[in-house]
């Protein structure tokens, strides 16, 4: 187990390093000058431009800029925002918490709705219920999150006036109340995927010979159901683990739609401004959450499935 974790962790670190370099390079190639963006539309003096470029090390060659940034990250420093002149860690502190809250609420909704529906549909394969939910899941997968968000905003925020239409509230329960519609929006498509994965896993187990053998041995329906669900748990659990990582990284459109002050909205505006330190930090944090979630899923898969250990999966 220790060797398995070490190999996976090393691969994760290499992935994060490669991703950080790619994003840094893409930002370097995009048009626009952060120094000119900061000084506004007026014609700045060469001295003012030079001072800003020196302050944020924009006058350094590309590779030196990257390695200076990487050295700061290794010392747990993410630099200073070019746009707000605020330490990036300070800028992200509250926003990361809000995005994490949104991802957690969406994940709970995904599991609470998608998994039970998938189990019920698999046990009633071919029924009207199964066909109805399956068709609905196709719509859920294909519907853009911003379109779902706008519909929910109009119906439950403007028309029925049940939920707030924008913002993240004043903290505590008020923040959670503001996150209900964004969480439903985010969970709409992901819940459809969770339904499909669960239905497929349970339906596949129901086709196995041991189910007929269990009934022939006199096991009750409840006992057979528990046996099937236990065997279907592995693919469902691993898929749901990856879903959480995707939820954390997929909040950008939802946060922009609902005017939430999370890292998604900050990332969108920072890319436009070419605020390199902020974009790099958000990208690295998001990639780390997704990569570490995938690592945790791999470890869980290795631990609960003896077939993986027997194959010596690396």
Image: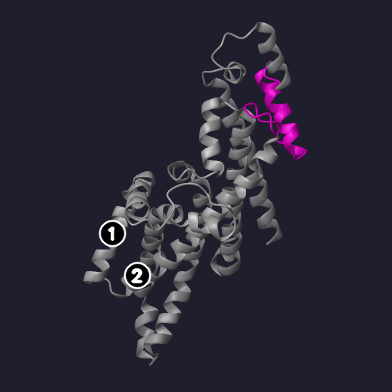
Comparing labels 1 and 2, the label whose residue is closer to the camera: 1
- Residue under label 1: 136
At 29% from the left and 53% from the top, the residue drawn is: 139
Residue at horizontal 46%, vertical 41%?
Answer: 256
Number of numbered discs visible in the structure rendering: 2
Residue 143: x %, y % from top left: 32, 48
Image x and y of residue 65, in percent: 69, 23
Q: Tell me where residue 149 appears, x and y as whole percent.
A: 38, 48
Whether residue 159 sits left or right of residue 75 in the image: it is left
Q: Pointers 1 and 2 in contact (CB under 8 A)?
A: no
Q: Residue 73, relative to residue 10: is it above or below?
A: above
- Look at the image and give the residue range highlighted in magenta: 57-86
Instruction: Report the residue marked by disc 2.
Output: 203
Is label 1 in a helix, a strand or a loop?
Answer: helix
Q: Is residue 283 magenta?
A: no
Q: Bin the neighbour count of mark 2 within 10 Å (Cα to Cα): few under 14, some 14-19, many 20 and up.
A: many
């Amino acid at each position: 187990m220790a060797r398995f974790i070490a190999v996976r962790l090393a691969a994760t670190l290499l992935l994060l390093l490669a991703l950080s370099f790619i994003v840094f390079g893409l930002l370097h190639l995009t048009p626009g000058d952060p120094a000119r963006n900061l000084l506004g539309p007026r014609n700045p003096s060469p001295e003012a431009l030079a001072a800003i470029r020196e302050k944020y090390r924009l006058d350094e060659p590309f590779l030196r800029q990257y390695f200076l940034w990487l050295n700061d990250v290794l010392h747990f420093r993410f630099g200073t925002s070019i746009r707000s002149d605020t330490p990036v860690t300070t800028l992200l502190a509250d926003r990361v918490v809000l995005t994490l809250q949104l991802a957690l609420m969406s994940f709970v909704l995904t599991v609470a709705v998608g998994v039970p529906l998938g189990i019920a549909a698999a046990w009633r394969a071919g029924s009207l219920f199964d066909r109805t939910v399956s068709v609905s899941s196709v719509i859920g997968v294909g519907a853009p999150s911003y379109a779902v968000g706008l519909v929910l905003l109009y119906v439950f925020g403007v028309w029925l006036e049940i939920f707030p239409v924008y913002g993240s509230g004043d903290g505590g329960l008020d923040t959670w109340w503001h996150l209900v519609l964004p969480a439903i929006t985010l969970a709409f498509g992901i819940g459809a995927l969770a339904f499909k994965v669960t239905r497929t896993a349970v339906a596949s187990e129901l086709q196995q010979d041991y189910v007929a053998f269990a009934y022939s041995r006199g096991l009750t329906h409840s006992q057979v159901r528990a046996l099937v669900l236990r065997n279907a748990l592995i693919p469902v659990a691993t898929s749901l683990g990856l879903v959480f990582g995707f939820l954390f990284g997929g909040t950008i459109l939802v946060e922009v739609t609902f005017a939430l002050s999370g890292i998604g909205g900050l990332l969108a505006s920072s890319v436009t401004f070419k605020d390199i330190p902020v974009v790099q930090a958000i990208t690295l944090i998001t990639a780390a959450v997704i990569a570490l979630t995938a690592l945790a899923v791999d470890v869980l898969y290795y631990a609960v499935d003896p077939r993986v250990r027997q194959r010596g999966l690396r």
